[in-house]
């Protein structure tokens, strides 16, 4: 079947995007629509003494100016973090209050204090500037290590010294003992730089309160509209679930930043009820930099020990994670259960201990961003492995190979049980594709041109297919992480698949249709994927954590199993054969070994006319499944980066980038390659270009593309992408997931390559030309001194 | 954007009188800096006087080695002009690397030098070429025109009409772009003119574009990249920001100067 599993089917969704007919939240226009603009704090930390909206309220077109006192007065609840993490002393995390509109205090630049509703966007923005807020500025802290110091500005009353939790995983004593007995140890300070997500479509919302039915509709840029509805109902008291419809239409990229329910959606819903108008808000790019949840921002000290044969004996990691001014929806899980549980990497390590302190600062909240904890883990592990190899004078590839996990299942000391993989096979494939054997000749040739050439490796592993509900429940998650699917066969045989996954660039309308095409032998054009609307899809957990393939598609498979069972019963009845002899292929239901068959649409018609179906069978052909995975999935791979550095300017050119990934079963190689390309682009962005910078007063210096370096096409190389797959035993399709791998695996490969080239391992991300040049100067100064 | 009045001027004199009549008027040419600034509510001129359609402010001519570029000539026109490529390829190449295609087809040379952004490219070229800036009122030498950061010798309501310079024996610009904005983190324009070697630096100096006397002295009589090697460039007086500190910029000035000279 040309459109089934493994086929490079062109993306069905691209037509509407290419002809400009995509339907994004900002494209939607409601009758009687008004526009919202937010009054935002220019201070990173201040007491809100008073808000005077009288001038703004008198301006042309202004419908209302609403503030936090009114919002909380109407019973709208505080924004919550949905994953409880317990400190090692047994105490619960110290979550400070976060009101959608600040009442007494603002805690980061951009914190919203009021919402202005007006007839036009320009009127709303002008009026927002006219709202006079009297602030009393307070001292500011923006870095996690400084925030933990005694005497640091106190951001939330219930989080002394700004400590949210002090959490650990693994056995500390055993790890200390193992490290004390190690023949070799390597210690490093490692910073994982803070990133801004920069989805192409900024966040937006349009909320409509229908007074007649006491019903709300919210269009929003969400990766998980059902979770949004659940949280808006259960915690923020906007409306009960049956009185709130949430629709996430076409969404232009998320990368994690659109998982969360932000103040703006809540305020727009409430304002719609207060004003009896539809209220629309679309973020501009500056607001996006200021208010979209950022990613990463870890400060880590790590120590790894090896025995005399270079086998790892222990790993100890201490991390301070900056969570910003408030706890975003999954902010507690990202630097703990999505990070420290992956610190075993691809390696057999008997002893691991990790301590994580989560910290409030006067910066925008930090939460999951493409990879979410796993890029931070792989960066720690793969920088350590490369550095240890250099310090011990052994080959970085051999050191890794010697320590690879080779037998599965493999229980790590940090919760995860790896189910499958062949790490050596990925490394072999990558080294061959990179022509590693010839590297030294290339280095010599580059030197003759005055360039410093280096090569770096990264052997990443991640946990995807998030996640087994009971497992995450036991770790503190407030929700289950199953997925639902409904397969509706219409009377004419066409199929609608309703999924709780949400596509915001991933190509679900194509890949999900491919597995249905494969199963029933139908063309993908006969299959429609429906998602993103709580009135259409009963429930779903949305798309993040590379879960839509392994979990979302598995739910579809389970629903298709039920459809198939019913189709076989109908076929056997109509064709007067035994159910065991019925096969479905090429769009027909056939009796094996005979020429008796019903075409697919005849089965559909039979089910709905119900003139001739088995006695006692209900008419219709529609089945539902809720699929809960039994384990995480473990995509893994080997990335090799080769660079040339211009020693005069510190400019790094990536001259080769090879990826060998194990994603398990691949449905559409073209789409998977696209995901890998995009992920590596973001990983190279983190390694070379991107970095959020706040000054000491909490002003965001990198608040536009003039200062925040988004990767451009000419910053990036052509990628050499390969697959070497082992099937995932944990789900029916054998899939592992591919959405985050590139962003997880690539940063350490890039930095390992540059540090190899320049002969100085002391280099932080983003490795800008200025930093690389300074590291080269430092290396030469050191050499001269010696 | 705040409310503003838009006027389209058809002559320099009309532009001058429209500016004179405005409370707080701004000349609009390509708008590549002014309009984003207005959109961000960082500028609120009462009136915009659009000079982009004024005939005498448009076009490029080369007569007897004198190059004249109308102030409202776009970067793309400068980059693509065959006569200029022949007379002074360094300026055409500089224009070809400003911003992106959209910027180059709207942004103009007059707008760039009137704004005198310290990280802009044209000021270095004009300074190194010893260009003359002709306004509605007078002629100003480049040495007098560029005063400091975002500061020029222009009076209020004064309109740049054209820029002219003598075609140099050699001229080349080497720019190291800011990774984010792609403006110059350091850019050096080196020219061998009838008045000798002239070297101007963009992007790096904390008081804007400036001439580098030591490099000019080194290059006089020895036009070679090696001549630059002996010049010391210190960090004093260099800009320092999140993209590069003063020491890095000082290094870039020297490296770019060497590349500029080697490039001609």
Image: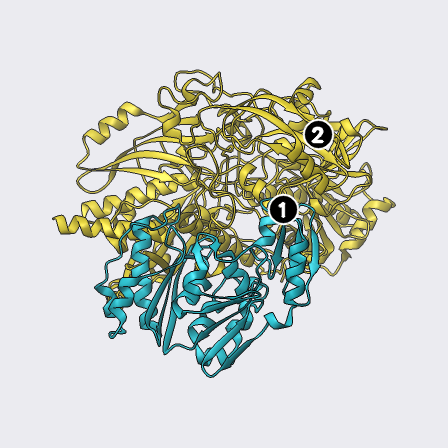
Chain in yellow, by letter, is A
Give left or right: position of B99 versus A13: left
Q: Chain B is drawn in which colour?
A: cyan
Query: For the view shown, which residue lies furthest in the bottom direction?
Result: B64
Query: For the view shown, which residue lies furthest in the front direction?
Result: B137
Q: Mark 1 lies on which chain?
A: B
Q: Distance between the residues labelled 2 and 1?
A: 20 Å
From the image, tell me which residue sits under label 2. Answer: A55
Tell me the residue at 69%/19% (across/down): A75
Looking at the rendering, which quadrant does residue A144 occupy? top left
Tell me the residue at 58%/29% (across/down): A480
Tell me the residue at 44%/47% (across/down): A690
Picture coordinates of residue A478, whole percent (x, y): 56, 25
From the image, tell me which residue sits under label 1. Answer: B44
Q: Mark 2 lies on which chain?
A: A
Picture coordinates of residue B131, whole percent (x, y): 44, 69
The reply to whether residue A592 is in sight is: no
What element does badge 1 sit on? loop
Q: In this view, does A452 lie above or below A163?
A: below
């Amino acid at each position: 079947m040309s459109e089934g599993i493994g086929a490079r089917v062109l993306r069905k969704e691209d037509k509407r995007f290419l002809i400009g007919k995509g339907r994004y939240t900002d494209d939607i226009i409601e009758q009687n629509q008004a526009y919202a603009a937010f009054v935002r704090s220019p201070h990173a930390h201040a007491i809100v003494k008073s808000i005077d909206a009288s001038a703004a309220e008198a301006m042309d077109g202004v419908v209302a100016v609403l503030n936090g006192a009114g919002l909380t007065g109407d019973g709208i609840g505080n924004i919550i973090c949905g994953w409880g993490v317990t400190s090692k002393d047994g105490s619960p995390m110290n979550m400070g209050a976060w009101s959608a509109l600040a009442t007494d205090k603002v805690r980061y630049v951009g914190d919203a204090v009021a919402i202005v509703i007006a007839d036009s966007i320009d009127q709303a923005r002008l009026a927002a500037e006219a709202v006079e807020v009297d602030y009393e500025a307070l001292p500011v802290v923006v870095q996690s290590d400084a925030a933990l110091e005694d005497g640091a500005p106190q951001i939330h009353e219930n989080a002394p010294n700004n400590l949210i939790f002090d959490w650990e995983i693994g056995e500390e004593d055993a790890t200390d003992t193992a490290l004390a007995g190690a023949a070799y140890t390597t210690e490093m300070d490692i910073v994982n730089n803070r990133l801004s997500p920069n989805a192409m479509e900024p966040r937006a919302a349009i909320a409509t309160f229908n007074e007649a039915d006491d019903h709300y509709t919210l269009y929003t840029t969400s990766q998980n509209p059902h979770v949004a509805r659940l949280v808006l109902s259960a915690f923020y008291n906007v409306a009960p679930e049956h009185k709130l419809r949430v629709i996430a239409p076409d969404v232009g990229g998320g990368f994690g930043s659109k998982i969360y329910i932000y103040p703006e959606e809540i305020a727009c819903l409430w304002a719609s009820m207060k004003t009896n108008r539809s209220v629309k808000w679309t973020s501009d790019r500056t607001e996006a930099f200021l208010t979209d949840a950022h990613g990463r921002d870890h400060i880590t000290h790590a120590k790894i020990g090896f025995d005399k044969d270079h086998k790892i004996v222990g790993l100890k990691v201490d991390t301070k994670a900056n969570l910003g001014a408030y706890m975003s929806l999954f902010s507690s899980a990202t630097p703990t259960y999505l990070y420290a549980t992956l610190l075993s990497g691809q390696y057999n390590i008997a002893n691991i201990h990790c301590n994580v302190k989560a910290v409030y600062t006067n910066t925008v909240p930090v939460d999951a961003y493409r990879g979410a904890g796993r890029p931070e883990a792989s960066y720690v592990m793969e920088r350590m492995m490369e550095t240890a190899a250099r310090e011990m004078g052994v080959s970085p590839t051999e050191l890794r190979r010697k320590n690879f996990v080779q037998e599965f299942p493999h229980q790590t000391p940090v919760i995860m049980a790896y189910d499958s993989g062949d790490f050596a096979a990925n490394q072999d494939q990558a080294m061959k594709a990179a022509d590693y054997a010839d590297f030294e000749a290339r280095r010599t040739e580059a030197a003759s041109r005055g360039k410093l050439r280096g090569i770096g490796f990264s052997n990443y592993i991640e946990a995807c297919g998030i996640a087994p509900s009971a497992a995450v429940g036991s770790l503190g998650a407030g929700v289950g992480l199953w997925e639902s699917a409904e397969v509706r066969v219409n009377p004419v045989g066409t199929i609608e698949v309703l999924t709780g996954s949400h596509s915001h660039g991933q190509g679900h309308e194509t890949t999900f249709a491919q597995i249905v095409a494969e199963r029933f032998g139908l063309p993908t054009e006969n299959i429609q994927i429906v998602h993103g609307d709580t009135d259409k899809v009963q429930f779903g957990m949305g798309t993040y954590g590379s879960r839509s393939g392994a979990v979302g598609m598995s739910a579809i498979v389970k629903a298709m199993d039920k459809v198939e069972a019913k189709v076989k019963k109908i076929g056997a009845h109509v064709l007067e054969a035994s159910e065991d002899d019925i096969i479905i292929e090429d769009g027909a239901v056939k009796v094996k070994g005979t020429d008796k068959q019903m075409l697919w649409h005849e089965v559909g018609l039979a089910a709905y006319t119900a003139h001739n179906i088995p006695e006692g069978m209900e008419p219709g052909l529609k089945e539902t499944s809720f699929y809960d995975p039994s384990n995480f999935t473990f995509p893994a791979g080997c990335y090799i980066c080769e660079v040339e550095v211009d020693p005069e300017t510190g400019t790094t050119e990536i001259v080769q980038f090879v990826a060998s990934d194990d994603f398990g079963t691949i449905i559409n190689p073209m789409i998977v390659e696209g995901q890998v390309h995009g992920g590596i682009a973001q990983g190279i962005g983190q390694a070379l270009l991107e970095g959020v910078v706040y000054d000491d007063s909490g002003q965001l210096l990198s608040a536009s593309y003039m200062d925040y370096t988004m990767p451009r096409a000419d910053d990036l190389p052509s990628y050499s992408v390969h697959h070497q797959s082992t099937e995932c035993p944990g789900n029916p399709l054998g899939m592992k997931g591919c959405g985050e791998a590139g962003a997880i695996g690539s940063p350490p490969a890039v930095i390992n390559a540059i540090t190899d080239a320049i002969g100085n391992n002391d280099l932080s991300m983003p490795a800008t030309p200025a930093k690389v040049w300074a590291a080269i100067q430092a290396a030469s100064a050191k050499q001269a001194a010696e | 954007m705040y409310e503003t009045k838009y006027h389209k001027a058809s002559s320099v004199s009309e532009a001058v009188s429209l500016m004179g009549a405005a409370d707080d008027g701004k000349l609009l040419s390509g708008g590549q800096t002014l309009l984003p600034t207005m959109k961000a509510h960082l500028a609120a001129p009462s009136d915009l006087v659009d000079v982009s359609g004024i005939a005498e402010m448009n076009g490029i001519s080369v007569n007897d080695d004198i190059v004249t570029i109308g102030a409202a000539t776009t970067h793309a026109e400068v980059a693509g002009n065959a006569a200029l490529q022949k007379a002074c390829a360094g300026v055409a190449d500089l224009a070809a690397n400003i911003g992106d295609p959209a910027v180059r087809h709207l942004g103009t040379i007059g707008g760039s030098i009137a704004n005198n952004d310290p990280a802009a490219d044209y000021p270095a070229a004009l300074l190194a070429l010893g260009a003359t800036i002709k306004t509605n009122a007078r002629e100003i030498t480049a040495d007098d025109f560029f005063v400091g950061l975002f500061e020029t010798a222009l009076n209020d309501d004064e309109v740049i009409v054209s820029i002219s310079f003598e075609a140099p024996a050699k001229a080349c610009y080497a720019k190291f772009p800011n990774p984010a904005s792609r403006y110059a983190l350091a850019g050096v324009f080196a020219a061998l003119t009838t008045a000798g070697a002239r070297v101007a630096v963009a992007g790096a100096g904390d008081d804007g574009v400036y001439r580098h006397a030591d490099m000019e002295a080194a290059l006089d009589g020895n036009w070679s990249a090696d001549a630059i090697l002996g010049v010391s460039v210190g960090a004093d007086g260099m800009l320092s920001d999140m993209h590069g500190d003063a020491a890095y910029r000082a290094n870039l000035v020297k490296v770019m100067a060497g590349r500029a000279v080697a490039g001609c």
